[in-house]
Image: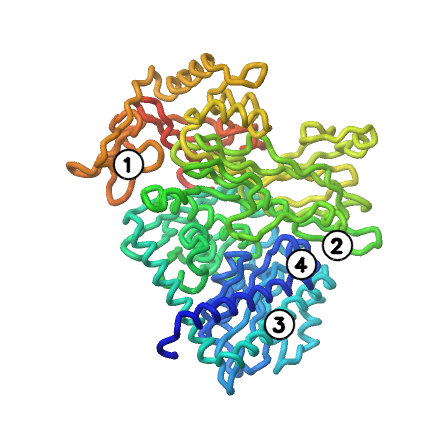
Amino acid sequence: MISGLDPITLEVVKHRLAQINDEQGATIRTISTSPIVVEGNDFNVGLFTEDGDVAIAGPYVLTHVTTMDTVIKNIAAEVDDIADGDVFLVNDPYLGALHQNDVALATPVFHDGRLRLWIGNVLHHADLAGIDEGSFCVNAKNVFQEAPRYFLRLADGGKVRKDVERTFTTNSRLPDMVALDLRAQLGALNVARRRLHELIDEVGIDVVTDVMHRVVDDAEEELRERIRELPDGTWRAEVFMDGDRVGSDRIIRVQLELRKRGDSLVFDYKGTERQSEGAVNATYHASYAGTIVPIYAFLCDGEIAWNGAVKRCVEVKAPVGSVMNAQYPAAVSICSIGFTWLATAAAMKVVAQMLSESEAYADRVCASWNSACNGNNLFGYNARGKMVGALLSDHRAGGAAARPFADGFDTAGKVTSHLGFLSNVESQEWKLPILYAYRMRLVDSGGPGRYRGGLTAAVAVVPHKTDQLVWKSQNTAGSDQSNAAGIHGGYPGAGSQVLVVRNCGLRASFDAGRIPIGHDQLDGQIEHLPSKSEGVLGPDDAFIFFAPGGGGYGDPIDREPERVAKDVAMGAVSERGAIDHYGVVTANDGSVDVAVTADRRDQIRRERIGRPPLEMNAVVQEDVMRIGPTLVVERSGAGTALRCGKCGHALGVRTDGTLDLREATVSEAPLREAGPWLAMRYEGESPNFCLSKRSCPGCGTLLDVVEQYRSKTSD
């Protein structure tokens, strides 16, 4: 490496590399016609060192950032005759691809006969075969029933191999779309290669490669410094999948422990259950990719580069043969929105707990963000008799959890992709034989809290200009519990739900000049579906779905009554929800009935602890550490006592960074207490889960609410 790389050259070349990588992404979006790519941005691009470490990553799907490098490292290990102009195609999940739909292309960049760096991109292809349309194989029991796994030399010495290209594209139900997406990836590599050679001619190859190594080294130093600023401790969380394949209601538990010591983090999935017979399993590198999403999003936060530095600072452990480290030949085609997605949901919870104990970073607490992917493939024949289909992107309208200073974002996209957008309704209708009945924000879908969780959006579509549509629904989880965690007394947000209304009478409603808003305004028979399902829609059947809402932050009855009244006026919270969740009663003119509200809130506190609450005399000592809005840790004496920050009542101890609220009052409630959109199959009374609530026995302040699994072992 060059010694004495000056700061100006470093910054100029670093930003040139970022611009080259951005142009790679722009090329993909320009050439592709796939809705999930062009509008949803379901792809990513990167520049890599000669060893395959990602140095410059794109701002698209975060779970691709740390899987692309695995693909390149495996190419280098397996191929001994890599040459300039070669392009390799890999979609094998056991070689680094997230799942088979995510096809990675990588090409080496040589200079003076020596391999000096790599260019790579990965893109979600709409269908690559397998037993189910869309290749999210909800019926697969092993990898042999899924889309083919490829490890191919697509271009040899700069020339595309037509035989390889044809084999790849014709093994698809949508060969035209797949062929164009593949050319989009090739075009992106070519553009990046051309721009890199221009840069190399301008500043020299050694400067370019030195800068790439330097940005990784700098990011490591910055990330370690930030981790050192966080408190040492141990934090734990659980998330669940309710149903791993069609016909299965197996509840699968994921247990995660985060340990922070010094300048490193360890995420440990010990206790997580065995790998599934369904296709939702995550390989180890996919589990790693999902786990570190909140590190990129909340620790790096746009200030520290997203690159290979994270693997030097963050370790992820997962039991071999578990759903977080599935072994060949486990089915994995739903991995990206299966247990990889749940890895992010679990990691969000433990990272939020850790950040809550940091004065410097407590404002970054966010316990959940679109905690399940309500991914639905719809396939049918258009008016020309041609099969068309796609993964709808409406699941990206899920809500984000509330923060310590503000409500969560409504219809917030997904934390795994900072540029993940909803497809335009008209664009979807143009490309697919569907008609949208509505896409609407869902009242009461944000978890109640002092700060309300973000709302999700519900979508209803019907077949249009076709006799029928086939659906393959691979909802991560949420037809039972939601995993949309709140924190510090905030309730979970809405679950992730799918339902079908048979013979809904939608067109008759349109003809009568009536636009139904909500499934309850449709005629016909409602079928609430489990998390994994398949079926056929007739001409007058409505397919309705929504992703999770965001969890709340803090005790809901601490929310200012005027803000609740405003929520009711704007349609975010119903009048019934205002009374039940927030203890706020509004008058006929929409204003707060102050006296009745005070009585209702006092009643809620009494119900929590079974007696009148004590006076709230806030703990004001300076020598305490505050955790969230209510907990304080006394620094004096043993330094471990936990007390209520509102009334000073003893709550438990803090040992080895773990909060033990042993003195709190514990109660249970059905999931419907969090809102009307949980466990809809069971009318809010899940046989598998309940809400476990802990309250201060002194003043009745709600300390936390978690979705508690009723059984000790899974099915």
Contact, CB < 8 Å: mark 2 with mark 1?
Answer: no
Q: Horizontally, is 674 left or right of 623 in the view?
A: right
Residue 480 appears in the figure: yes
Q: Which residue in the protein does label 3 denote?
A: 191
Residue 679: % across, % down: 54, 33
Rounded to the nearest whole Å, what is the CA distance between mark 3 and mark 4?
A: 26 Å
- Dot 2 or dot 3, earlier in sequence: 3
Rounded to the nearest whole Å, what is the CA distance between mark 3 and mark 1?
A: 56 Å
- Dot 1 or dot 4, earlier in sequence: 4
Q: Which residue in the protein does label 1 denote?
A: 660
Q: Amino acid at mark 2?
A: Val
Q: Horizontally, is 609 left or right of 517 in the view?
A: left
Q: Amino acid at mark 4?
A: Asp
Specify few, some or many for label 1: CA neighbours under 10 Å numbering under 14, 14-19, or 20 or more. Answer: some
Contact, CB < 8 Å: mark 2 with mark 3?
Answer: no
- Dot 2 or dot 1, earlier in sequence: 2
Q: Quadrant of residue 181?
A: bottom right
Q: Which mark is residue 152?
A: none
Contact, CB < 8 Å: mark 3 with mark 1?
Answer: no
Residue 95 appears in the figure: no
